[in-house]
Structures are given as structure tokens and as C-alpha cells.
Amino acid sequence: QVQLVESGGGLVQPGGSLRLSCTPSGILFSLYDMGWYRQPPGKQRDPVALISRYGDTNYTDSVKGRFTISRDNAKNTVYLQMNSLKPEDTAVYYCKAERLIITTQYTYWGQGTQVTVSS
């Protein structure tokens, strides 16, 4: 059974930092593209940062220069380092693992971790 366990969320003041972690089990982590998504209250879930199995990264414009996604294949973990946090970063953050095998897309989600940026 596949599980993605996220950690690292919490309450932080504007300008502060947090590091989210996501550790999947039940998949061969190094073969999966990984991503962080977020869902603010009452809004849809959108991508924040993506990292391919090869280490290529992509960020949504609003977090460029502030957030860094990385992965450690030896630890089966993907990270999201979030600096200079703003109130508009407040959301539930979700980890996603995805892999295309031939024509079948395998997608798994974590349970989400709350990030609240407030003074």
C-alpha cells in the first residue's frame, strides 16, 4: 500500500521559514516525479513546486526565489524549504508522487499539512 507522509507544517510569522518533508512508502521513490501543491481555504489545489526524477525543478511564479524543492533519493524524501513566508502562503500543503508507465499514470497524494503564516 502506498503512503505519503508529510511533516513540517505549522504556524509561522510573516518573513519566517518552514521546511516541509514528504516520505513515501510503497513506491520506488527514485522513479517518481514529486511535487508540492497547496490549497488555501475555499480555493482549488494548485501546484507550488515540482521536481522530476532527474532533479529538474519548476516553481509557480509567486514562490520563485523564496521556496526551494529538493529530493534525497537515499532517504526517500522530498523537501520544500519555504523562506520569506507571506500570509498568502497560508494553505494546506500536499505532496504528490507521479509516474507514467507506458500509458498508465500512477498518482499518489499525501494527507496534507497545514501552513499558517500570521502575526
Image: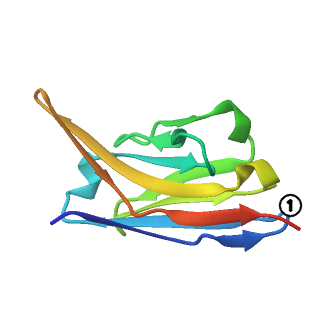
Residue 31's spot in the image, x, y percent?
A: 24, 47
The residue under the point 53% across, 66% down is 113
Q: Amino acid at mark 1?
A: Pro
Q: Residue 111: name its quadrant.
A: bottom left
The residue under the point 89% across, 68% down is 119
Query: Dot 1 lies on which element?
Result: loop
Residue 13's spot in the image, x, y percent?
A: 84, 67
The residue under the point 76% across, 48% down is 88
Regarding residue 64, the answer to whether it shows in the image is: no
Looking at the image, is 78 positioned above or below residue 97? Answer: below
Crowd class of label 1 (few under 14; some 14 to 19; many from 20; radius 10 Å)? some
Regarding residue 92, the answer to whether it shows in the image is: yes
Task: Using residue 71 as the reference point, say whether residue 26 is left or right of it.
Answer: left
In terms of depth relative to the viewer, which is nearer, 29 or 40? 40
In terms of depth relative to the viewer, which is nearer, 93 or 50? 93
The residue under the point 77% across, 70% down is 12
Residue 5's spot in the image, x, y percent?
A: 38, 69
Task: Using residue 65 as the reference point, say whether residue 109 is left or right of it.
Answer: left
Residue 52's spot in the image, x, y percent?
A: 39, 40
Per the image, the residue denoted by label 1 is 14
Task: Using residue 67 as the reference point, say whether residue 38 is left or right of it.
Answer: left
| The N terminus lies in quadrant | bottom left
